[in-house]
Amino acid sequence: MPEWIPLLVPDMPSPEELLPYLQRMHAAHQYSNFGPLVLELEAAFARRFALPQSQLTTVANATLGLELVLQALGLPPGARVLIPAFTFVATATAVVRAGAIPVLADVDAHSWLLTPAIARDACQRTRIDAVLPVAAFGMPHDMAAWQQFEQGSGLPVVIDAAAAYGSQWLQGTGGTLVFSLHTTKSLPAGEGGLVVSTRPGLAERVRQLSNFGINLNPAASVPPGALASVGSNAKMSEYHAAIGLVSLSKWECGAQARQALEADLIQILNAASGARLRWQTPACDAPLMAPTTLCARLPDAATRNALEAACAQARLMTRRWYQPLLSQMQALPGDTVRLPTPCAEDLAQTLLGLPFFAGMAQGQRERVRAVVEAVF
């Protein structure tokens, strides 16, 4: 029997690449608490976003980043936060753990994103206090459109850009972005997250909350070392910053390889299916720069099920991404608001994740192509 083709393979730096950074860390004897490597990584991010370093901060992971951003916004108790029903569960759990109520909305049928138009419709249906769109599968949002929504509605918008590092930028506007540096993302640090925000003081507030809420500013109204507010321990370690620095140093090369792999797979699978597969389309002019997944939309549920079964028979790993939908998650609190989600429900019936990873061999690509051709 042939070996299984995995769905994902983490593209992590080698021990040899990490060694110089680990030696620096060991020489400094600082392993956490905003150490030299964390500060160096944050400075590198600040240059890439062309922002002052005070407008971004690293965190232990993107989920905690979302929680702390929502807390830092100072939303009222029981605030209602609009999120897409089609997303990973961490988006919803972050809202709940921040003391807010999730409001589950639909997504666009083509981009698979919660859009400003969908958000405006939701605001007409129920009370909304903040909006948390998700860059599903790394597809970037139109930041100018969200800034216009924010200015017109007065509601804060935070982009859950967990999978979108290198694709989601501020695009010349203001905004708040939260990225994941998990091992499966386009910029892997093993674990970690990045909060970027042009909202005055927000990133600094998140940074303080990530350090238990302890004040470190001598000019503040409470003395240094005192608790300024109740936060959490969500600091990035020097170990993860070391991995992040190596990954960042070669990010462009990896992104180009992923783009080429995606283009090749889409081309051969379109031919194999008679152009009956559908793919996620951009919501704006900013393209997906470093894809980490390959999700095909099948014509109907029966075809999706048939392809899924054929892949299993051929020993190809697949995944029904973001299923069940958040609206079907019984563990969410009873006060969760569930708006109509016809497009998300259709996606849940027809979407299938196929193998996609850096270094995917030609023979592995051919096996995927052959299975798709056999089903169609």
Image (cartoon, helix red, strand yellow):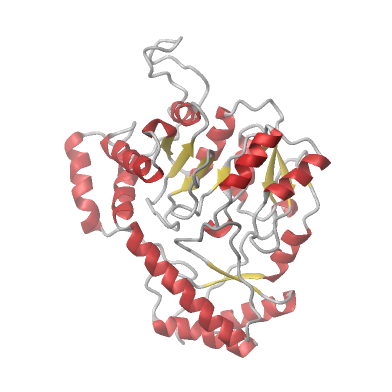
Q: Position of residue 237 (x, y in %)?
A: 35, 39
- Would residue 164 be found to the left or right of residue 136 on screen? left
Q: Position of residue 35 (x, y in %)?
A: 29, 34
Camera-side residue of 1 and 170: 170
Q: How many marks?
A: 0
Camera-side residue of 190 and 50: 50
Give residue 308's quadrant in the image. bottom right
Q: Position of residue 31 (x, y in %)?
A: 28, 36
Question: Is 354 above or below relative to 14?
Answer: below
Q: Residue at x 50, y 70 (%)?
A: 7
Q: In this view, which residue lies farthest toward the bottom?
A: 374
Question: Is 213 above or below relative to 43?
Answer: above
Q: Residue at x 45, y 35 (%)?
A: 234
Q: Residue at x 40, y 54 (%)?
A: 187
- Would residue 171 be found to the left or right of residue 310 on screen? left
Location of the C terminus by quadrant is bottom right
Q: In this view, which residue lies farthest toward the right?
A: 125
Q: Position of residue 339 (x, y in %)?
A: 79, 48
Give residue 255's quadrant in the image. bottom left
Instruction: Say if residue 131 shows up in the picture.
Output: no
Instruction: Say if residue 69 shows up in the picture.
Output: yes
